[in-house]
Amino acid sequence: MQRVLAKETKDNIGKNITIKGWIHKKRLLGGLTFINIRDRSGLVQVVINDKSEVEKLRGLQIGTIVDISGNVVEETRAPGGAELHDGVINVVVPVVDEPPIEIDKPLSHKPENLDTLFDNRVIGLRNLSEQGIFRIRSQTLKNIRTFLDSNDFVEIQSPKIVAGNAEGGAEVFKLDYFGKEASLAQSPQLYKQMMVGVFERVFEIGPAFRAELSATTRHVSEVTMLDIEMGFIDTHEELLDFIQDMVYDTVTKIYADHDDILKKFNAPELKLTKKFPRYTVAQIHEMYSKATGENTHSDKDLSPAEERWICDYAKKHDGSEAVFATEMPIEAHKFYQKINPDNPKTVLAADLLFRGIELATCPMRENNFETLTNQMKEKGIDPNAPGFESYLKAFKYGLPSHGGCGFGIDRFVEKIVGLDNVKEAILFPRDINRLVP
RNA sequence: GGGCUCGUAGUGCAGUGGUCUAACACGCCUCCCUGUCACGGAGGAGAUCGCCGGUUCAAAUCCGGUCGGGCCCGCCA
């Protein structure tokens, strides 16, 4: 008989149907047994009176795959308003070992238990609340793609094996490439800029690899980045507006569509304004120093404590959990970023902060060939090094004023759901200690 | 890389020198239970307390080492 999904059960009242899936929960009440079956669409309840049917499941654990045929009955007491009666069970894949981690109750997300959570990830993800995180992640990426697509962006894939240390700065994973020195890409930065010369507007969603010895709740060695680059934008404001609209659109849709999952994780109530508040880094140093008595004026960038503080401030003061920290100090300048013509001590770069953490860096790029070449030399980068030669060609042969962002998808999902560790928003996280599963 | 912390059944935890023959909850096994949905009830199995060494009459508990985690900082997404 053709398979009917759990969520379609209520559309088949009065019919005899077959469902296929995993045993999610058994409740034996003597003469009456309730079984919840999980499939890709959710759960369906089966009621069995026949003891010989229940006996088929003796010794079999949660995770056992069955198909069950039965009559669909409307029942207000059943979850979803309908259930299967007179079920006939066929065990397809018996499971005799009990699961190492619970799949029908919320799992512990306490920091000290994350190790167990990840060690048992394969089974733990079957847990409905755990899945919820990744349904939201999937939806988040879908919303972002839809938004960018409707703004004429082309999705690209840049190489992840690159020559040398392409961008400078962050530590990279070195590897042997048929006898040549190569590394795993720490960012699609150079490639997406080159592609502005082709499509004007491009984006990429893919992995970036960071070999830094960071051991925090917000760092992983393999991060999923959303990289955006758009040509023919003239002002930094224009760029920030665009990213702000994308974030607003994405997050508000998630909150509208996934209330149930967000509630399970006690996600905070969403506070966003259409226009995200913007403060310069200097202003934030000033406000933070005044508020805490701790002098941060000479810091080149925001400290994690300042990031948390300004998010808290913007939430209370501006009604927005998202905030831009603009005019990054020149000390944090990277060669491809555009120096602020109105204030050469700052860079036309902003960090997007959300719920206490940096989600994205959003700079304008230096698109003048001569200036860019000089900026490279100032940073000690050889413009003729492998990788940079092609990069510069894009400028030599015409690249318009452009800007974009590197946007951490893992952190975004983490904070949308209201989690405390970026790893919880990653299926199989990689950090300095973890390489499996 | 620096600092601080933690390590007890499959899972989550209690116990910080002797009453520990290590408690409780979930899960598991047996039995009872016809509307459960974190079902309920009765009983049972399961841990030599990460590992090694030391102090002590006595160590899960104190000390040292070691292995494995976690958190913060630096760096960044």
Image (cartoon, helix red, strand yellow):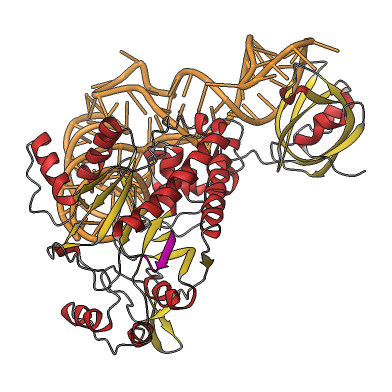
Give the mark count. Answer: 0
State the residue at coordinates (51%, 29%). A263
Q: Is residue A174 above or below residue A212?
A: below
Q: Is residue A206 above or below residue A269?
A: below
User: Can you give x and y, in whole percent of width and height, for residue A220 in the image?
Assistant: 38, 56
Is residue A88 in sight in this rendering?
no
Q: Main secondary structure of the magenta part?
A: strand
Q: Is residue A43 above or below residue A424?
A: above
Quarter holding the N terminus of chain A? top right
Q: Is residue A18 above or below residue A388?
A: above
Magenta region: A224-233
Is residue A24 in sight in this rendering?
yes
Task: Please tell me in which quadrant of the rendered image residue A211 appears.
Answer: bottom left
State the residue at coordinates (39%, 73%). A193
State the residue at coordinates (80%, 24%). A82
User: Can you give x and y, in whole percent of width and height, for residue A159 in the image?
Assistant: 47, 76
Give A381 or A178, whichever is nearer the viewer: A381
User: Can you give x and y, in whole percent of width and height, for residue A319 in the image?
Assistant: 32, 32
Task: Answer whether residue A240 is magenta in the image.
Answer: no
Give A386 or A116, whichever is nearer the viewer: A386
Q: Is residue A17 left or right of residue A258?
A: right
Q: Is residue A44 left or right of residue A155?
A: right
Q: Is residue A78 left or right of residue A229?
A: right
User: Can you give x and y, in whole percent of width and height, for residue B9 in the image?
Assistant: 50, 35
